[in-house]
Image: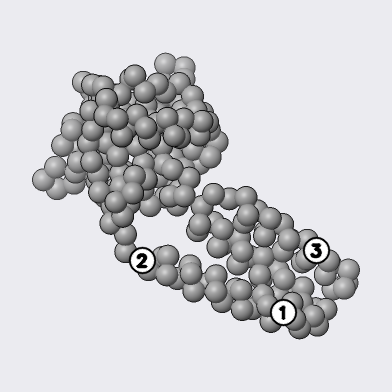
Amino acid sequence: MLQQITPWFGYFASLCLIIALLVNNDLKFRWFNTCGNIFFISYAIILQAYPVLITNVVLMCINLVYLVKVYRKKEKFNLLEFKGDEKLAQHFLEFYQEDIRAYFPAFEASALPGKLNFVVTRNLVIANMFSAQLLPNGDAQVLLNYTVPRYRDYKVGRFIFDKENHYLAAKGVKRLVYTTAFNKQHKKFLLVMGFTEQSYAGQYQMVKLLQQTAGA
């Protein structure tokens, strides 16, 4: 029975390595590589293919060391406001225009002026651009919350929605509202961040009640 399922370990290992080459995030790359190593190790043990076993044990150790470094690494996050007509902001939007369309198809750069706009830097690199329309009732309707592909590991989201509660509260924000979540991956991200799907005027929205911090 074991001999019959052995090829599947090889197939799953190859699939993990293929996916690792397709993802655009370093952390995901290492995790898929590690999974592939585990499958190859199982495959090699069953077949007693010792060269394959040794190679993948070494590679798995390298991947695990990298993952430990990533999770222990302390990164510097900063939030910087901007008006919307700055050249740097426009260049950022132009560079990522195609990917932004996949997540926020209705967004237009011309809508930035007059909104709550900020970028999140991660070790001095722009990792995220955020824009929202502030309403009198305390709702912040999110027009754009775009994180560049290499930083999509939820750290930026937690920085905005959790650590920077005091900043949003100081702006009068009580709820963060997405009138639509066009992309399935983005909707998954919002659910992880604590947003809930609610019905309003016959339409579904993604809503997060802002936790008020002491002194905010």
Residue 208: image location, x then y, percent:
35, 36
Which residue: 62% across, 50% down?
22
Categorize mark 3 by other alpha carbons within 10 Å: few (<14), some (14-19), many (20+).
few
Q: Which mark is residue 73?
A: 2
Residue 168: image location, x then y, percent:
22, 38
Identify the residue position indicated by label 3 in the image. 8
Vertical order, 5 against 54 (above or below): above
Residue 186, can we see it?
yes
Earlier along the polypeptide chain: callout 2 or callout 3?
A: 3
**What is the spatial separation of the Cα atoms under label 2 and label 1, in whole angstroms?**
30 Å
**What is the spatial separation of the Cα atoms under label 1 and label 3, in whole angstroms?**
16 Å
Identify the residue position indicated by label 1 in the image. 53
Mark 3 residue element: helix
**What is the spatial separation of the Cα atoms under label 2 and label 3, in whole angstroms?**
36 Å
Mark 1 residue element: helix
Circles 1, 3 touching at the beta carbon (< 8 Å): no
* Residue type highlighted by circle 2: Lys
Mark 2 residue element: loop
Categorize mark 1 by other alpha carbons within 10 Å: few (<14), some (14-19), many (20+).
many
Q: Which is in the foreground here, disc 1 or disc 3?
A: 1
Q: Which is in the foreground here, disc 2 or disc 3?
A: 2
Categorize mark 2 by other alpha carbons within 10 Å: few (<14), some (14-19), many (20+).
few
Which residue: 38% across, 35% down?
92
Earlier along the polypeptide chain: callout 1 or callout 3?
A: 3
* Residue type highlighted by circle 1: Leu
